Image: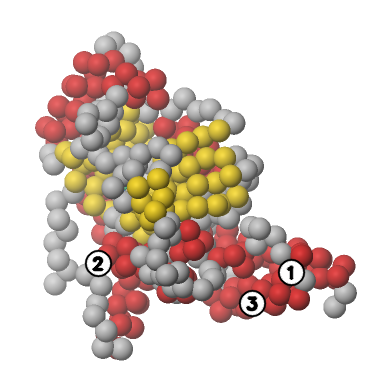
Amino acid sequence: MDRLTAVTKIAELTNSIERHNRLYHEEDRPEISDQEYDQLVRELIELEARFPELAQPDSPTKRVGGAPLPFFEKVVHKTPMLSLGNAFGEDDLRDFDRRVRQAVGSQAVRYVCELKIDGLAVSLHYENGLFVKGATRGDGTTGEDITQNLRTIRSIPLRLSRPLTLEVRGEAYMPKPAFEKLNKEREERGEPLFANPRNSAAGSLRQLDPKIAASRQLDTFIYGIGELQGESVDSHSEGLDLLETLGFKVNQERRVFADIEEVISFINTWTEKRPTLPYEIDGMVIKLDSYAQQQELGFTAKSPRWAIAYKFPAEEAVT
Ligand SMILES: NC(=O)c1cnc(N)c2cc(Br)sc12
């Protein structure tokens, strides 16, 4: 194959792989099997090996990861990763609302409610639109560099739709069907089972060999912006819309309410609907939407005064 043909073939394969990725992740309607998808990636790997100067930095082949690492490097987060205060009942939420309104006075208040995904918190760093580093939350200030493992997660874009430099936060998780399939395979091999999808996601991303993470069908929901250069947004919901346009997978169940009683009713709805989701959640995150109002409330020693995590009661074990 001559170089010009290789350029065309590489572009065709890349576009096809990225299209199938979007169908699989954003629209949940894959047109080809995982095996056919992997075959496309293998063809691209072979072409890039024959014409290395034609390999792109955000090529889908960069997802399969290199050799196992000897250890994980430490990463200091540009902006510390939050931990949230907890609410265990409706009155805790009403107390939270009272504190918020005391601080913002007569200003209108909007709360963004988002499902609290039960996975592993991660931070993703992009430079000029390219995914360059990903890390675990760690202690909130310093995490572990698990870039190689995160690259294998197909819902994490290797290149954003705009060449922005930013750091985002989200949750890497294992969907319930993938968890059940993984444990079934481990049982057949006589290996110890994972206790729940969160442990299996964490266990998969803490592996030094990226081939293991690549085999685990992990997924992500991105829900926060740490650092953002060259763009400004005034509220959390605007930030989520920006994340979506950039190519991140953002959970669609988010809602904005003006009144804490509507938040409580939304939480009660999801307490019932929780088992119908194809991924595990352990509560609801409620955030003050306006960044200006968030700034007015600020932080306690360890968590924001403008957000709270409502924890669902432990799910009844399925007998
Ligand atoms: N949407 C969100 O803000 C969200 C979802 N799921 C989670 N496990 C967490 C944790 C923090 Br801290 S925020 C958050």
Q: CA distance from mark 2 to mark 1?
A: 41 Å
Read off the residue under disc 3: 42
User: How many neighbours does mark 2 have within 10 angstroms: few (below 14), some (14-19), or many (20 or more)?
Assistant: some
Tell me the quadrant of the picture where the C terminus can be found: bottom left
Q: CA distance from mark 2 to mark 3?
A: 32 Å
Task: Tell whether label 1 touches label 2 (CB within 8 Å).
Answer: no
Tell me which amino acid carries mark 3.
Answer: Arg
Camera-side residue of 104 and 319: 104
Q: Please state the horizontal and vertical placement of residue 100, each as a whole percent of the image.
A: 24, 22
Residue placed furthest toward the bottom = 189
Which comes sooner in the sequence, label 2 or label 3?
Answer: 3
Residue at 39% in and 20% down? 292
> Which one is in front in this view, the residue at disc 1 or the one at disc 3?
1
Residue placed furthest toward the top = 106
Q: CA distance from mark 1 to mark 3?
A: 15 Å
- From what the image shows, is residue 160 above or below residue 210? above
Q: Which label number is shown at residue 269?
A: none
In-image side of 136 versus 305 (left or right): right
Read off the residue under disc 2: 196
Task: Tell whether label 3 touches label 1 (CB within 8 Å).
Answer: no
* Secondary element at image label 2: loop
Which comes sooner in the sequence, label 2 or label 1?
Answer: 1
Residue at 59% in and 31% down? 230
In-image side of 316 versus 199 (left or right): left
* Secondary element at image label 3: helix
Which comes sooner in the sequence, label 1 or label 3?
Answer: 3
Tell me which amino acid carries mark 2.
Answer: Asn
Tell me which amino acid carries mark 1.
Answer: Pro
Read off the residue under disc 1: 52
